Structure formats: structure tokens, C-alpha cells
Amino acid sequence: MNVLLVYAHPEPSSFSAALKDAAPRTLVAAGHTVELSDLYAEGFNPVAGRHDFTAGFAADLVREQTRLARADLLVFIFPLWWGGLPAILKGWFDRVCAYGVAYADGKRFDHGYFVGRRALLALSTGGTPERFAPDGAYGDIRQVLYSVERCILAYLGLEIMEPFVAYAAPRVDAAAHTAYLRRWETRLLEIVGDTAWHAQLQARAEEAARNRDDVEEKAWSSQR
């Protein structure tokens, strides 16, 4: 499997960084290919604008869209800030998953460009599991993540995996961190080792390619 890790945290000592470091180590050892987009370290520009279309394609945009095109599994590693994505990660979606590159009119959800591929959100929170319970202060975590999972990932045609959540990461002890990391490694290996998914990915490859037919050239010049 080809795995793209998109990582959004500025602090190397964060628990998000520990998740980021464990993922390629685990996946490569199991024989998979991993690419890492470390958005802060690579200086990714999250601000979309006319420059993305009128001044030629910036190097960071070309790099990220090329990585996206190669990925079978997309893994997004980030801290939950204000109930949502860090701005730099939201900007990654804004710029990289552009019209004509990641979707087009009528080419969404089950007819999207990325049908057959998978996406996984891996996040750390400051709040405890109780705060993210259905009757908790913040509401169920899937409700909190709904706009990302449904209106971005599923919109592109991706199959959404159950999110990996390290609750209260800044508040728990070293033993809890270790347990989180062991579960994280196991979860990754379960996903990439799913032979039924391997077959599905291959079976839907032609469908995904057909979904791009007759729209790519028009999409680039569309007024949006």
C-alpha cells in the first residue's frame, strides 16, 4: 500500500509528533510505502488565492498534489483545535484538493475521483473521553468531526475509517501514552493489512479512472 501521512503540528515534542513518528516506522517495517507531508516543517502555504491559478503552480502545491495522487491510504495527524482542524491543515484541503484535481461537477461521493481509497483521521484532544461523549460538553466525537469526514473526505469519494483519538493527550501519564501508541500501531497495520480492501481497491481502479473522464480539461478552465 502507498500511504500518505499529512501531519499538522508545530511542536516536535507533542503527542501528535509521537503518532507521526510511529506511523512510518510501523508501516515501512510491514513492507508499505510511506510519504510524509509535515506541513509546518516544510513551510506549506495554507492560503488559497489567485496565485494558485494565475502565476503557475507553486512548488509546494505541485508536491502535495503529486503525493495525493499516489496515495491508497490518506492519514491525517493533527491536534483538535477549537473543535476543528488546525488552519494549516484546512488550508491543505483548500489548496491541494482543488476543483479539477480532486473533484468536479457530478464527480463526488460514490462517483468521486478517489473511490476505493481510504482516509483516516488521527487526532489528539485536550478533553477527556467524557467530554466527547454524546451527552458530554463537546458532544460525540463523530459529530465534532462530521464536517471533515462527510463534506471533505467522503465528498472526494474516500472510504472513511473510524477515527483514532488520543483523548486528553496532554493530561495522561507516560503509560497511557505508550498504550495509545501501541493501539495506533495496531490500528494502522489492521487497515493496510485488510486483504478485502486490497481487492476492492484494485477492482475500483478503473471506475475511479472513468470518473475523471471528460471533466479534467473542462474543470481547469471553469469559472469558480
Image (spheres, rainbow, N blue to C red):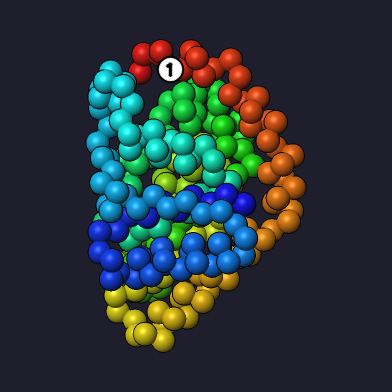
Q: Amino acid at mark 1?
A: Trp
Q: From this viewpoint, is residue 143 visible?
A: no
SS at circle 1: helix
**Residue drawn 58% across and 66% down?**
29
Decide which of 137, 52 is in the foreground and name it. Answer: 52
Provide residue 57's location: percent of width, then percent of height: 33, 26
Looking at the image, is 141 positioned above or below residue 160?
Answer: below
Residue underneath mark 1: 220
Using the image, determine if residue 78 lies above or below residue 221. Answer: below
Image point (35%, 53%), residue name: 38
Q: Is residue 4 visible?
A: yes
| In-front residue for pair 178/148 | 178
x 50%, y 14%: residue: 217
Q: Is residue 147 above or below residue 131?
A: above
Q: Position of residue 141 (x, y in %)?
A: 43, 61
Judge left or right: residue 177 versus residue 50.
right
Instruction: From the top left corner, tell me how far across and down residue 125 is, in percent.
Output: 34, 67
Task: Specify the quadrant that holds the C terminus.
Answer: top left
Question: Camera-side residue: 44 or 79?
Answer: 44
Depicted 24 relative to depicted 101: above or below: below
The answer to whether residue 41 is left or right of residue 135 is: left
Q: Residue at x 32, y 34 (%)?
A: 59
Q: Crowding near pointer 1: few (<14 within 10 Å), some, many (20+)?
A: some
Q: Quick check: 65 left or right of 47?
A: right
Q: Report how many numbered discs are placed on residues in the image.
A: 1
Residue 69, image x and y in percent? 52, 37
